[in-house]
Image (tube, rainbow, N blue to C red):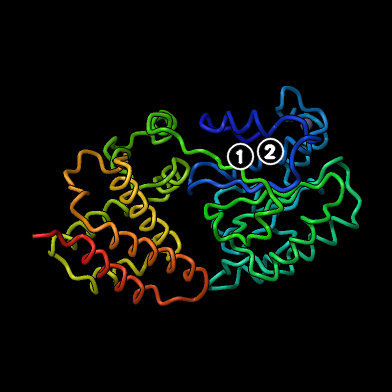
């Protein structure tokens, strides 16, 4: 079974009890990189295992064997082409191929970030018609906020009249983007972030031989994202980006040139990263919670206009949503970086 992360043990005790008492629609939310996928997959296995003990799937029954092999007929993964290609969990990639044309997907230059309605229609057919081997059937939808309007409307019908034994696990780091009709038929289960200590304890043995400063100065992200970013070299890149943005704020570089440089990155990842930086700065300013990544920075957060920070936050949110479709990243970045400069221009 996939590991339950230490900071999710409470949520696990609460949700992994009897399937009979679990709500059929769960929205598993939490910031990017806290381990929502891992938690949801473990919960799906728990719901399908026919022999679980102490709320843990046994790993030995036919259900568990099929589940781990990526062939359980009652586990359904609905996701975007982008997630299928870029997602880091191999099991997800294996299951989602039942719902996607993997050949067509592989030929695309820009795999879609959207979950289209035809996947939900196929899910409805399979949920109502096909035979199954387990008492439960589980649909994992991730990221659930990527469903287009038609897909969300189609899913709504299933949520309103769920077939017996059906469970829907909707995973998202932006629950506010889900249609209110979907939210009203599900139960919100926020998955907590680790404390800085928990994150450090978990990451240290995994970042073998890494410079400890790399971790201390890690950009804002959950530990799963930090580990993935480290393994792919993105973490080191983000440190360079942080330095470049600092130079910009100090008036030592040009927003247009920096935008051209940053525009070579993955738009969604880059904008998510920037959005979280500003979100952390807002929390720092409003609630005095200095983000762990700020280290011993002498930034005087109280000097900046909260209204401008909020506008920058909203702007990043808007571009983050647009980045799922076609977008000119360089132009967007120019506007964002100029806003960064205006926001962080010190008074007097
Ligand atoms: Zn089992």
Judged from this view, the residue extending furthest toward the left is: 348
- Residue appearing at x 33%, y 70% in the figure: 333
Q: Position of residue 294 (x, y in %)?
A: 26, 43
Residue 241 figure quarter: bottom left
Labels in figure, total: 2
**Counting other residues with Cα less than 10 Å from the Cα at mark 1, is it few (<14), some (14-19), or many (20 or more)?**
many
> Image quadrant for the C terminus?
bottom left
Front residue of 347/31: it is 347
- Residue appearing at x 57%, y 29% in the figure: 9
Q: Which residue is mark 1?
A: 39
Question: In the figure, 179 relative to 223: above or below?
Answer: below
Residue 243 figure quarter: bottom left
Question: Circles 1 and 2: CB distance less than 8 Å?
Answer: yes
Q: Position of residue 318 (x, y in %)?
A: 44, 68
Is label 1 within 8 A of ligand 1 (CB to nearest ligand atom)?
Answer: no
Q: Position of residue 322 (x, y in %)?
A: 48, 71
Question: In the figure, 44 relative to 318: above or below?
Answer: above
Q: Is residue 160 toward the left or the right of residue 77 in the image?
A: right
- Residue appearing at x 26%, y 38% in the figure: 213
Q: Is residue 287 toward the left or the right of residue 323 in the image?
A: left
Q: Quadrant of ligand 1?
A: top right
Secondary structure at badge 2 equals: helix
**Counting other residues with Cα less than 10 Å from the Cα at mark 2, is it few (<14), some (14-19), or many (20 or more)?**
many
**Disc 1 versus disc 2: distance between alpha carbons?**
6 Å
Q: Which mark is residue 155?
A: none
Q: Which residue is mark 2?
A: 43
Question: In the figure, 259 relative to 188: above or below?
Answer: below
Q: Position of residue 280 (x, y in %)?
A: 34, 48
């Amino acid at each position: 079974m996939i590991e339950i992360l230490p900071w999710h043990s409470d949520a696990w005790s609460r949700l992994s009890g009897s399937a009979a008492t679990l709500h059929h629609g769960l929205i598993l939310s939490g910031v990017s990189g806290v381990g929502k996928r891992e938690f949801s997959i473990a919960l799906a296995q728990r719901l399908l295992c026919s022999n679980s003990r102490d709320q843990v799937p046994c790993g030995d029954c036919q259900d568990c064997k099929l589940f781990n092999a990526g062939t359980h007929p009652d586990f359904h993964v609905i996701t975007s082409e982008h997630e299928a290609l870029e997602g880091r969990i191999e099991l997800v990639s294996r299951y989602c191929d039942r719902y996607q044309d993997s050949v067509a997907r592989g030929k695309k230059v820009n795999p879609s970030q959207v979950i289209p309605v035809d996947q939900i229609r196929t899910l409805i057919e399979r949920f109502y018609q096909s035979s199954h081997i387990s008492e439960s059937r589980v649909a994992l939808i991730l990221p659930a906020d990527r469903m287009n309007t038609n897909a969300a409307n189609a899913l709504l019908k299933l949520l309103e009249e769920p077939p017996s034994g059906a469970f829907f696990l909707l995973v998202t780091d932006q629950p506010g983007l889900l249609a209110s009709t979907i939210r009203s038929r599900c139960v919100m289960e926020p998955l907590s972030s680790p404390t800085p200590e928990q994150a450090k304890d978990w990451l240290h043995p995994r970042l073998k031989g890494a410079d400890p400063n790399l971790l201390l100065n890690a950009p804002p992200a959950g530990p799963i994202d930090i580990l993935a970013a480290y393994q792919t070299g993105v973490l080191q890149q983000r440190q360079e980006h942080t330095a470049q943005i600092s130079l910009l704020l100090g008036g030592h570089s040009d927003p247009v040139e920096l935008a051209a440089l940053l525009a070579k990155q993955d738009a969604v990842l880059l904008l998510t990263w920037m959005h979280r930086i500003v979100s952390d700065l807002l929390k720092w300013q409003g609630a005095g919670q200095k983000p762990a990544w700020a280290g011993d920075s002498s930034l005087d957060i109280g000097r900046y206009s909260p209204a401008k920070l909020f506008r920058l936050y909203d702007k990043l949110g808007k571009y983050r949503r647009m980045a799922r479709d076609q977008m000119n990243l360089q132009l967007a970045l120019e506007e964002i970086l100029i806003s960064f400069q205006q926001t962080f221009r010190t008074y007097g």
